[in-house]
Image (cartoon, helix red, strand yellow):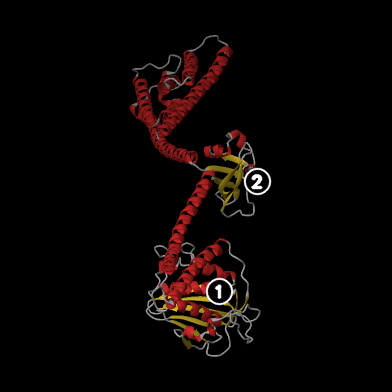
Amino acid sequence: MESIASATSDKARHTLKRAAVGFSLGRATLALTILGGLSFLLLASDSGVVSFTPLVLYWFCAATFLSSGLATWFLARGQHVAPITGIQLGLDLFGIATLVYVTGGARSAFAFLYGVVIVAAGIILGRRAALAFTLAGLVLHACQATLLASGLLPPPFDQAPAIYLHTPVELISTLLPVLAALTAVGVLTVILVRRFDDMRDRLAASQREASLAARRRDDVIRSLQSGLVTTSSEGIIDNANLSAQSIFQGSLDTILGRAISDFIPGTPARDSDSSLIRQETSGVRSSGVPFPVGFTQTPLVNEQGLHTGWLFIFQDITEKLALKAEFERANRLATLGHVAAGLAHEIRNPLGAVRSSVEVLVEGGLDPQDTAKLGTIVQREIHRINDLVTSMLELAKPRDPDIRAVDLAELAREELGMLGLQYTDVSFVLSTPASDAPVVAWADADQLRQCLHNLLRNAVEAKSSGPITVTVGTSCPSIVSLDVHNEGKPIPPAVKDHLFDLYFSTKSQGIGIGLALVKGFVERQQGSVTVHSTARDGTTFRIDLPRASAQRVTPDGCGFLSGGRPQESPMAHPDRLDHLDRSASDESDVCR
């Protein structure tokens, strides 16, 4: 603010100096013109005798010219501008009084020159000077006229005395209009100068505000950590801040006039005159070294809304990308640690069961029934480890699904039969359509069996108070569904949103890959998996798959319809499924 005020004060002084110099030069020019005219008249006189009045005028003009020249020299140097101008105006008052004296006194036509001095004083020196010179001019003119009329001041000896002698009434009638006119000139000058000063002050305030805004704008642009460049409509750089010069590694002279595409290839995007573009790409420094850059491009428009160029704000994102890569690496390591801890826990438990069973078997002395039981435990826990390793392999390198026609009911019976042997204290229910027509899906049987196995294990671990129900049905004419329902506690919404996220688990030692595998398997088979969970209805996971041909075929023991690989089905041994309750439900071909 101080610098702006100082600049405004300097400008005011410069304006005053110019006005004073101009007035002084004009004064000298006028004096020189009159002096030249008088010189011609004097030289042309036949008598050769110079009268008093021309001589006074001659020397008055000569003195005015010389004083103006001297004043102009001082004013041009900027020294004592106001005092010198005031002295000149004061001398002019006395000069005008002399001119009035030799040209008729109160009746002189040159009395109007007092008004000229008053106006000049107001314009150059201000309202107070205009008021002061108005009073001085009135007093000087009135006193001179009164003294001449009263005879106290003798008239010029080369003039007729009758011109200067007035009765009081004549003096008043002659003097009063002149004084009134000078007063009016003074008042109008003061008013106009005041208005001019107000306008000048407002203009100065506006200029200060504009200057402050411009400096603040420059400070903001200078302080930006991001590079800022403006270009013409053709993409030629016409301005760049310090950060842009630093990022491009070039001086302002080497950047201005070049195309923005030299530094940010592919810019500007000319087909987006009214849009904002954000992008990350590879930039080029002045030395030709590439670097990653993130930039924003927006059009520049004038007050009429016409497109005049482009504005680019950009950053060198080398450090950002490095931090991002470091963060991703740390995240991968953290995830690897989490998975390793979960794997260790998951593998340790079945290994502990296997070790204990083997130790008992080594000691011997068991009856055949106990031996068979321990063998079953060893096989089950080995299967657990194998399933875990298989899941990790599927996650690391998923194979393409082998799509075939799969009977969902038969596949569900097989899986429930095996889980029924493992979880003898859990009740499983299979619900199929009342008709004998199989519910057939296009799917990979092995992957779908793994999906169902994961969903059923989650249902078992949910500690449902009722049975776990698997429902096979038709959602739409072209979609078949496989539902797994349990009546455990509902899943919180915050957890539900992340159920299928990889490595997300609510278990203290969970890995969080089971449901992620389910989602991946199903989606690769052109299906979808959803979950519905409420306190009243319980939790239901639904797998929707494309429906295969409805033509009736005899399922083989593996859940395949045609072209399947025959395997022994648990259904061949009804005694193993005594725990399996069956119920039927009708399904329609209308989407549920």
Residue drawn at the location 48% of the way across and 52% of the way down: 333
SS for dot 2: loop
Mark 1 is surrounded, within 10 Å at the Cα level, by few (under 14), some (14 to 19) or many (20 or more) other residues, namely many
Number of labelled discs? 2
Residue 413, above or below 270? below
Toward the front, the furthest residue is 365
Query: Within the image, what quadrant is residue 199 found in?
Result: top left
The residue located at (59%, 72%) in the rendering is: 526
Give amino acid for label 1. Leu
Residue furthest out toward the top: 48
Which dot, 2 or 1, sits closer to the camera? 1
Image quadrant assignment for residue 558 = bottom right
Work out whether residue 146 or residue 115 is closer to the camera in this orientation and state it. Answer: 115
Query: Pointer 2: residues within 10 angstroms few (<14), some, or many (20+)?
Result: few
Relative horizontal placement of residue 19, taking residue 557 as reference (left or right): left
Q: Is residue 449 above or below residue 101?
A: below
Q: Which residue is mark 2?
A: 234
Residue under pointer 1: 448
Q: From this view, report whether residue 395 is shown above or below residue 295.
A: below
